[in-house]
Image (tube, rainbow, N blue to C red):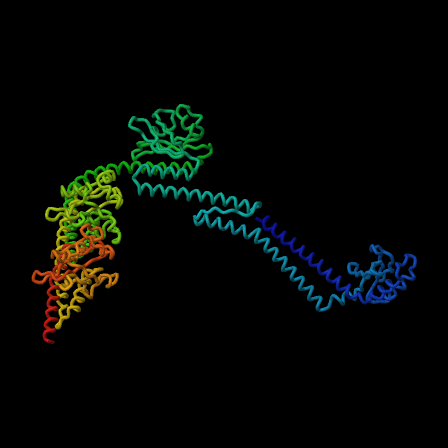
Amino acid sequence: MKKFITKYLLISMVMLVAAVAIWIFVVYHWFQGTMHKSLTSVVAKTQSGLSQANAVPSKDSKDRMKLYFTDLEQSKEIITYAFLNEDKSLNYAEGLRKRDNILWALNAVYPVIVGEKIVGWIKVWPSPELVASSFLTEKNILIVLISLLLSIILVFTLASVYIVRRFFMPMSDLKRIINNISNGTAQDIKLKYKSGILKDMGESLKRLNSKVIDINTTVQMLFSVSKALTSQVDMNQIFNVIMSIIQKKSPNAMCAVILPGEDGSLKITAKRGYSQGFSKSIKVEEGNPIADAFIMGKMTAVKDLKSIDEEFVKDFINEGAVTQINIPLADENNFCLGVLNVSGKNCDIFDTDITDTISIVGKYLSIALRNVRLYDKVQEANRRLETEVITTSNELIQTNARLIRKVRDIKALYDISAFASAKFNLNEITKIIVDKIMELTGMETSAVLVKNEKTGVFEFLEGSFGIKAENLAKYAVCSKIDLIKSLEEKKTPVIFNSLIDLKQGCPEFLKIFPMSSAVFVPVEQNGKVIGLIVPVNKLGSEISDNDVKIVEHIAVLLSGVIEKVKLYSELEKKVNNLTFLQGISSAIASAPNVEKTLAKIIEVTKDAFNADLCAVLLYDKNTGQLATQPGAYFTGGQEKVMLRIDKNDVNSLSAKTFREGTPYLSADATVDPSIKSQSAQQWGIKSIIIVPLKVDNEVIGVLRVGKHEPDAYSEEDKNLIIMIANQAAIIIENANLYDKLSTCQVK
């Protein structure tokens, strides 16, 4: 340590001496320049004289040379002088005056220029008095002192930086290593110095630090093993944890847990590092290091496997193993349960630390094996107890589950009933039915179809399969397909639990919606199938019998809902009809006018049936024609339908209705072969109703109503128009009588 400190002190002194030398050199050149500047005016005249001589004096003309240097000779500021040639070799020198007073280091040199060429040099030495007076000025002393101070500061700065870098920074690294060791953080540190006592100290501390790191790693690994033993009972997982820890400690190691088999031989139960195909049965016989560890219950270590009989270790040698350690796994009675085998591919892989770690891990593994055996015994006892408990509780659970399902089903049916009782729109009701089916059965979606009595097809209601309301009309299902025929005939649910069955039994529904399983439940009313409920799964979940029963209950409820909605619809229609007839009756004013009365009847009838054509034709006895009355309505203009038709016209359906006195209904007048008139085709009227106007069984005209769309009117609509016509005929007749009575009174 003394040498170390002496070394750095000497280095600091050398740096100080070097700094002082540099300072003296700088001060000397600075003062030299000061002297040169001070003597410039003294030498100027001599300089000028030599320049004007226009030649360099020869050596033997000393008198003449002396003449040139007269001013210098007489100057008190100069002790002596000399003239140098162009190459600064001596040409002429005055004898020295007061030689002891000359400061040889201080001199000034001035060039002698002729034209543009330097032909020589004048060299002078100042007197000590001039030197002293120049140096001892206040300004020069201050400059010298400041430069000295700066030099000293620079020296100490450089020395400090050097000492910090070469002494204190390494000491800081050493301090961190010591702190790591004392705090147990065990972090590796790289040292920045390469030689000397600090390197030796650092290397020693690094070795100590590595030792601490190894100890901490070992402790952490053993802690991990402890956690594995207390948190897991799966031996394969424990084996994997143990072997992973060993390989972390020694990456090139190969591990295996060897346990006795049913045949008495030792077999590899778990391995890590050995090849996939490595599997070995080991006979329990002397000479085999694994069998020796198992029999004697002591650790066996082999530094070179080739020194053992090849019969015992050739499989390990083929795996690349060179050295091997075998740790016996014993129970609390020192009975060997198995062997922990660790092989290495290098001879020096197992140092003392690694061997100790593997021995400790082997003890932990022994504890794990004992715990697993105890755990198995406890588990067996628990299984017997659990069997008894499960047998008793399963019955309670099943009973409870059935009760819960029943309550849930009853509540869902109640919710549907409650909702349906307050609603009369079938589409709104089917939406909640679809939601409840999905809630009760857990199926992915459902559809509700109702049979259209006119067309015979099954139409989807809103909420079905999540199809948008505006697209539902595209997916109607014909009742002639085999599945529908079977449902209408047998009236029992049909279940499809595979895609193959669905493709064979209901391909039409697969085109509408993708499904993997489905059940088709008929909705009956008065012995006929009036609808279907179709819950489906898009993924491969099967439909249970319980799900089918739930849907059947809902189907019964839906049947009642459809009947209720139908009755409500009929009742609502009757109310509307009565309201409409009341509107016709209101057409009679206190002083009825035929023309206004007809216009009112036509307007009310047109609005009620949303008609594109509405006209009243009355029989004119004078002409024998049916005349269209004012107020007639047609979307193409009133003037187009203001016709007069001969009552005997065989091509006119209106004339035919007048003659026969029977109403007529056509779904599409443009294709109806019984209609010979061209008027309906020209006007684009397809749906048409023509009814006679009768008073006391006498036909006085006809009322015709039409629409551009086909199949717009039903038999019920025709019956309503007949009632309107009968009432209108009475109103018209009354208006005519009133007009006649008014005419008589006027006369």
On the question of residue 579 being in view, the answer is no
Q: Nearer the viewer, residue 100 or 496?
A: 496
**Residue 565 x/y as whole percent:** 14, 55
- Locate the C terminus by quadrant: bottom left
Q: Quadrant of residue 154?
A: bottom right
Q: Residue furthest left?
A: 696
Which is nearer the eye, 45 or 673?
A: 673
The number of callouts visible is: 0
Compared across the picture, whether 465 is left or right of 189 comes to: left
Residue name at image x 46 percent, y 42 percent: 211
In the image: residue 677, left or right of residue 729: right
Residue drawn where x is 46% and y is 32% of the image: 347
Give the side of residue 157 with respect to residue 739, left or right: right
Residue in the foreground of this view, choosing between 717 and 102? 717
Q: Position of residue 686 (x, y in %)?
A: 22, 54
Residue 455 shows up from this direction? yes
Q: Quadrant of residue 624?
A: bottom left
Residue 2: x %, y % from top left: 58, 49
